[in-house]
Each structure stands twice: as structure tokens, then as C-alpha cells.
Amino acid sequence: QVQLVESGGGSVQAGGSLRLSCAASGYIFWNYCMGWFRQAPGKEREGVANIDSYGGTSYADSVKGRFTISRDNAKNTLYLQMNSLKPEDTAMYYCAADRRPLGTCEGVDFGNWGQGTQVTVSS
């Protein structure tokens, strides 16, 4: 059974940094596209970044140059380094895994989700 557990959220002032982690278990982590999403109160969930099995990454325009997604396949862990945080980055952050072990993120179908970790950025 796929299990994803996020950690590392918290409260920080604008301009600060946080590093989110997502510990994965119950499946062959390295062979799956992984992603980070966020949802702010009253807003729809949005994709933040994803990473394929080979380390290829993509980012939402709103976080390019500030956030970095990475993965440690030996530790079955996904990361999101967030720098230069802004109040508009305040949201619940979720990690997700593709339903299928395709390696690539093309045609990804994120069907496995963690419970989320809250990030709050004050001005």
C-alpha cells in the first residue's frame, strides 16, 4: 500500500526558506513520477513541481527560480526546497505519486497523495 508522509512545513517570514520532505513507502519509489501540489484556502489545488525517475523536473511559473524539487531514491524521499518565500506561497502542500511506474512524468496520473503539511508565510 502506497504511503506518503509530508513534513517540514511551518511559519516563516517573507524572504525566508523552508524544506519540505515526503517519505514514501509501500512501492518502488524510484520508478514513479513524483510531484508537489499546494492548496490555499478558497482556491483550487495547483501543481508546484514534479520530477521523473531520471531527475527531470518541471515547475509552475509562480515558483520558478525560487523552489527546487529533488528526490533521493536510496531514501525513498522527495524534497521541495523553497527559497525567497512570499505570502502568496501560503498553502497546504501535498506530495503525490503517479499511479503507474512509468518513470516519466509525461501523461502522469497522480493517484496517491499524502496528508499535507502547512506552510504559512507572513509579510
Image (cartoon, rainbow, N blue to C red):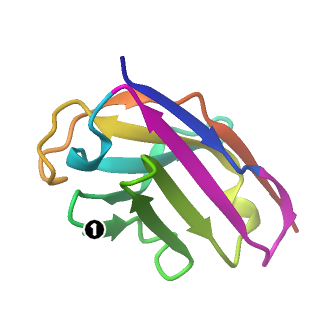
Q: Is residue 20 a member of the stretch shown in magenta?
A: yes
Q: Quadrant of the N terminus?
A: top left
Indicate the secondary structure of the residue bearing disc 1. Answer: loop
User: Label 1 sits on what residue type?
Assistant: Gly
Seen as rendered, the residue at the extreme front is: 74
Q: Is residue 78 a member of the stretch shown in magenta?
A: no
- Identify residue for label 1: 55
For the stretch drawn in magenta, the main secondary structure is strand
User: From the viewer's perspective, is residue 41 above or below residue 37?
Assistant: above
Q: Tag count in the figure? A: 1
Q: Residue at point 67% right, 40% down?
A: 117
In this rendering, position of residue 48 left or right of residue 41: left
In the rendered image, residue 83, in percent from the top left (x then y), is placed at 66, 76
Q: Quadrant of residue 84?
A: bottom right
Q: Residue at point 19% right, 53% down?
A: 105
In this rendering, position of residue 117 left or right of residue 106: right
User: From the viewer's perspective, is residue 80 above or below residue 35?
Assistant: below
Q: Quadrant of the C terminus?
A: bottom right
Seen as rendered, the residue at the extreme top is: 1
In the rendered image, residue 99, in percent from the top left (x then y), is placed at 23, 30
In the rendered image, residue 95, in percent from the top left (x then y), is placed at 48, 42
The residue carrying pointer 1 sits among few (fewer than 14), some (14 to 19) or many (20 or more) residues within 10 Å by Cα, namely some
Q: Residue at point 52% right, 58% down?
A: 79
Closest to the observer, 85 or 81: 81
In this rendering, position of residue 6 left or right of residue 105: right
Q: Quadrant of residue 89?
A: bottom right
In magenta, the rendered stretch is 10-26
Closest to the observer, 35 or 59: 35
Seen as rendered, the residue at the extreme bottom is: 65
Q: Residue at point 68% right, 37% down?
A: 41
